[in-house]
Image (spheres, grey):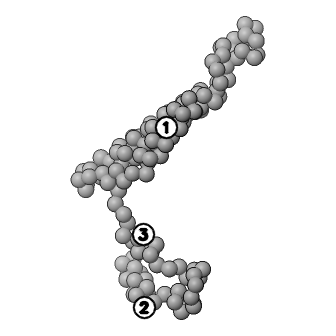
Amino acid sequence: MALVLAVLYSVGFYLLMQRSLMRVLMGIVVLGHGANLLLQLAGGPPGRAPIMDAVLPEEITDPLPQALALTAIVITFALTTYLLALGYRSWVLVGHDEVQDDVEDRRIAARTPDGAMEEGTAEETDAGPEDTADSHELEEARR
């Protein structure tokens, strides 16, 4: 069962890292199944129903893993419906369900932050004229 859990989690995480929303959706579903299986395995072997004076306390089933599995099913269902709605909206508006890169995020990531721990002088890491022009354009766009 540990091997099955490892396969479910690895396939789920692999699909989760893809750019297509449908593959992300399938990754969430596979991870949900892996979480349910893990919770059921953590509950131990099946026991007997907790009926008073009919069962010894050692034979009673712990209901907590079953309750947690039910919660995991509900959460997986909610994420599935949300991602289906996102995929449908992306398909209608753009024509595909691939997640696009944000150009602004790339520009910010490429900039060297102030006070960066790099070799060189402070003049090299300060913002140049192109950075100040970009900041002025961003401020004007916000207005």
Q: Quadrant of the C terminus?
A: bottom left
Q: Quick one: quadrant of the N terminus?
A: top right
Is label 2 in contact with label 3 (beta carbons under 8 Å)?
no
59 in relation to 27, above or below: above
x and y percent of residue 16 in the render? 43, 48
Q: CA distance from mark 1 to mark 2?
A: 52 Å
Residue 107: quadrant of the picture: bottom left
Give me the residue at 30% from left, 46% from top.
88
Using the rendered view, name the quadrant where residue 47 is placed.
top right
The crowding category of the residue bearing disc 3, from other C-alpha atoms within 10 Å (few below 14, some 14 to 19, many at least 20), is: few
Q: Please tell me which residue is depicted at 47% across the width and 46% down the height of the picture.
A: 13
Q: Amino acid at mark 3?
A: Asp
* Above or below for 85 versus 114: above
Looking at the image, tell me whether mark 1 or mark 2 is earlier in sequence order: 1
Is 142 placed above or below 60 here?
below
Q: Which residue is mark 3?
A: 105
Q: Position of residue 111 (x, y in %)?
A: 46, 78
The x, y position of residue 22, in whole percent, is 34, 45
Q: Nearer the viewer, mark 1 or mark 3?
A: 1
Report the disc number at residue 7.
1
Read off the residue under disc 2: 129
Label 2 or label 3, whichever comes before in sequence order:
3
Looking at the image, residue 30 lies above or below residue 112: above
Q: Amino acid at mark 1?
A: Val
Q: Nearer the viewer, mark 1 or mark 2?
A: 1
Q: Looking at the image, which residue is at 46% across and 42% down?
A: 12
> Within 10 Å of the Cα at label 1, are there few (<14), some (14-19), or many (20+) other Cα atoms?
some
**Closest to the observer, 21 or 12:** 12
Could you tell me if residue 81 is visible in this image? yes
Q: Is residue 8 left or right of residue 96?
A: right
Q: Residue at x 75, y 17 (%)?
A: 58
The residue tagged with tag 2: helix, strand or loop? helix
